[in-house]
Amino acid sequence: MEVIIVRDEDEAGEIYAQCVADLVSVKLDAVLGLATGSSPLVAYRHLANLVVEKSIDISQVRGFALDEYIGLPLSHPESYHSVIQRTVVEPLGLNSENVHVPGDTLAGAPLSDGTRMAAGVAYDRAIAAAGGVDIQILGIGTDGHVGFNEPGSSLASGTRIKTLAEQTRIDNARFFDDDVTKVPTHCITQGIGTIMRARHLVLLAFGAGKAEAVAETVEGGVSAFCPASALQMHPHATIIVDEDAAFRLRHKDYYRYAYAHKPAWQGI
Ligand code: F6R
């Protein structure tokens, strides 16, 4: 696990964008794991800029989103189907047929529709059939969730339906006119086991509100209590945090020292 403490979100975005550009230069049809929420937006923006600046051909790049709300129609501006279109597919110029969102054919169907269980299994199969995710970008919830794997989620879980924690709904109310009652109660999310199969995980966290979850993730015990702590078991996980989100890390000096002395050829 590598921890990179950056001066601001832009530096994090530049690091992610360069990492994706390096991958696409050797693998035209790279598979990107996509997150929604606020944290990855700067990374997508920098990647979109780099694609134009360096004339990178990303027409064959494929994508799999982490999660989707249940109960919102696909056309709802806050369905993750819409968010991924708006923040990733359109600015990057990806082919939308190559970009998938869990359960996207079922987004408007009621929770009682049992076909959603099958949708989770089908999603994991589709990721495997694509050869697996190369780079998975992740945000982290204030309760330590990744994807929408709330505390208590199995660290071996596959894509499935979950109930959102009340805290997550409160945190996400900002996307729903600050009205928590408008935030769906359920979602379909890649499991921790699904996420852990990606070859490289890049987790972004900014702001003091994430400091506790980041400390638990990086320096706490591996536990379903903090699902993101599973990243400690991943052979290639990069945690990029700003100073505020790094505030509670005990080994900040070492992380800074290691990054400053990293051989340039190593990348992240
Ligand atoms: C979104 C997702 C969530 C968010 C997390 C942090 O696809 O999987 O885990 O990454 O809730 O959200 P932000 O970045 O908005 O703080």
Image (tube, rainbow, N blue to C red):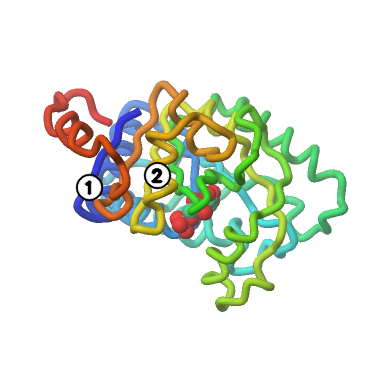
Task: For marks 2 and 1, give the one nearer the viewer.
Answer: 2
Residue at x 87%, y 45% (from the top left corner):
114
Look at the numbered disc 1 and give the secondary structure of its residue: strand
Residue at x 76%, y 52% (from the top left corner):
106
Residue beneath label 2, please? 214
Amino acid identity at mark 1: Val
What label does residue 6 carry, if any?
A: 1
Amino acid identity at mark 2: Val
Residue at x 67%, y 72% (from the top left corner):
182
In depth, the one of 161 and 230 nearer the eye is: 230
How many numbered badges does the structure rendering display?
2
Compared across the picture, whether 97 is left or right of 6 comes to right
Give the answer, above or below, for where 218 lies relative to 181.
Answer: above
At which x and y percent is residue 161? 73, 45
Q: Quadrant of residue 232?
A: top left
* Mark with earlier residue (2, 1): 1
Compared across the picture, whether 226 is left or right of 121 comes to left
Q: Quadrant of residue 59?
A: top left
Q: Quadrant of residue 19?
A: top left
Mark 1 C-beta to ligand 1 under 8 Å: no
Residue 89 at least partly seen = no
Q: How many C-alpha atoms fall within 10 Å of the one at disc 1: few (<14), some, or many (≥20)?
A: some
Looking at the rendering, in which quadrant would you find the C terminus? top left
